[in-house]
Amino acid sequence: MKKAFTLAEVLITIGIIGVVIAMTLPSLVTKYQKQQFAAQLKKAYSTFSQALILSQEFNGPSDTWLTLEPSSTYEENLNYFKLYWEPYLKVLQVCETMEDCGFKIHNYASVSDLKNYSYFGQYTNVPGFIYGDGTYAYIRPYNTNSTADNPKKVQLLSIDLNGPKNPNIIGIDVFQFEIDTSRGIIAGFGSFLYGRDASFCTKEKVKKSNDYARSCSIKVMSDGWEFKSDYPWYR
């Protein structure tokens, strides 16, 4: 006579499988999300680096470009974008506000403060834009710490890898960079103006300051465009 599993044995087996899936699925989803965002971030960086090179071919070396200040008007920043950047990116839409680009928020959260959406969104005097496959970005004059003896020509580049889609958190799907037009270089946020490095993106430091989360772009670049095990992913 052939033996068969009893109903109790089948239910126990199904229960065990369910527990295993429940334990492993979140880590698999996280691993996939990290790989996806890392690949998108690398592509976004490459896109802007190539646009910077192309723009210099048509507009001259970037150190000769017009210099704007954080106080520049929306019209001035829009004209700057249309001259130096828009022709060299596949721009789908230019937005005066984040809402115009489909967002339901005005600012971002950060890995320092996950539920508080009040950090470093699109400024009212700069245009935002959607390009390529739906990536959102804005470029803002950011000549912090600039002096007559040490002038700086830096633009803040903020990139939201999946546009209005969640999680909209700096350090997860939102990353910020500095464009140093005096040297034609794009680096992670804080590299030029504050002398930061990858050590500013740790679980301990981002807990202390949401501003340090902005420098996590440095760490991802330093780690070969990967989110390593020590990255403060949702802390």
Image (cartoon, helix red, strand yellow):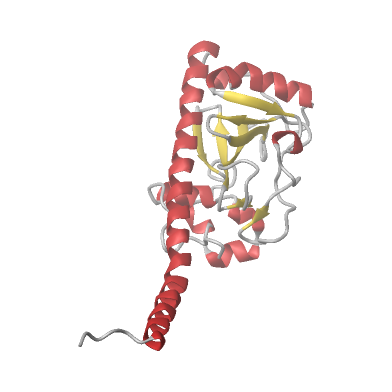
Q: Is residue 52 left or right of residue 86?
A: left
Q: Is residue 65 left or right of residue 106?
A: left
Residue 226, given in percent of the width and then of the height, sits at 41, 51
Residue 117, given in percent of the width and then of the height, sits at 73, 54
Between 178 and 167, which is closer to the camera in this rendering? 167
Identify whether 29 is placed above or below 102.
below
Say which residue appears at 43% left-offset and 71% top-offset. Answer: 21
Say which residue appears at 40% left-offset and 51% top-offset. Answer: 223
Number of on-image labels: 0
Residue 106, given in percent of the width and then of the height, sits at 76, 45
Identify whether 221 is placed above or below 66.
below
Which quadrant would the N terminus be assigned to in this image? bottom left
Quadrant housing residue 161: top right
Say which residue appears at 50% left-offset and 27% top-offset. Answer: 184
Quadrant housing residue 131: top right
Q: Is residue 84 visible?
A: yes
Residue 220, given in percent of the width and then of the height, sits at 46, 50
Q: Is residue 152 visible?
A: no
* Residue occupying the far front of the picture: 1
Q: Is residue 106 left or right of residue 208?
A: right
* Residue occupying the far left of the picture: 1
* Residue occupying the far top of the picture: 58
Quadrant housing residue 137: top right
Which quadrant would the C terminus be assigned to in this image? bottom right
